[in-house]
Amino acid sequence: MANTIKVKLVKSTIGAIPKHKKTVEALGLRKIGQIVEKQDNPQMRGMIQQVSHLVKIVEA
């Protein structure tokens, strides 16, 4: 897939505000250490920026 980005959940959502929990779930992340591959577009970048303290971008 061209123009993709890999996102890894590095911190638990326990204690996070409900909006951030829903954003992490919408990214498809459920467990710490899980990596998902998403399209690299402004919408995904915005979601990642919103929960940047919980996730990290993994280099391919």
Image: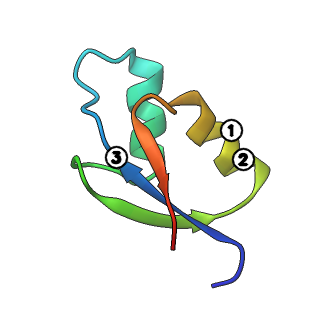
Identify the coloring.
rainbow
Q: Amino acid at mark 2?
A: Gln
Furthest residue in direction bottom, as rendered: 1
Q: Amino acid at mark 3?
A: Leu
- Residue bearing mark 1: 46
Image-quadrant location for residue 2 = bottom right
- Residue bearing mark 2: 43
Q: Amino acid at mark 1?
A: Gly
Residue 55 image offset from top left, x and y in percent: 42, 41
Residue 4 image offset from top left, x and y in percent: 63, 71
Q: Residue at x 65, y 50 (%)?
A: 44
Counting residues from the start of the chain, the first of labels 3 and 2 encountered is: 3
* Mark 1 touches mark 2? (CB < 8 Å): yes
* Mark 3 touches mark 1? (CB < 8 Å): no
* Mark 3 touches mark 2? (CB < 8 Å): no
Q: From the viewer's perspective, is residue 54 above or below residue 35?
A: above
Q: Residue at x 57, y 41 (%)?
A: 48
Image-quadrant location for residue 25 = top left
Per the rendering, the mark at residue 57 is none
Counting residues from the start of the chain, the first of labels 3 and 1 encountered is: 3
Q: How far separated are the C-alphas under marks 3 and 2?
A: 18 Å
Q: From the viewer's perspective, is residue 35 above or below residue 13?
A: below
* Frontmost residue, 42 versus 19: 42
Mark 3 or 2, closer to the camera? 3
Q: Residues within 10 Å of mark 1 (few under 14, many from 20)?
A: few
Q: Residues within 10 Å of mark 3 (few under 14, many from 20)?
A: many
Per the rendering, the mark at residue 9 is 3
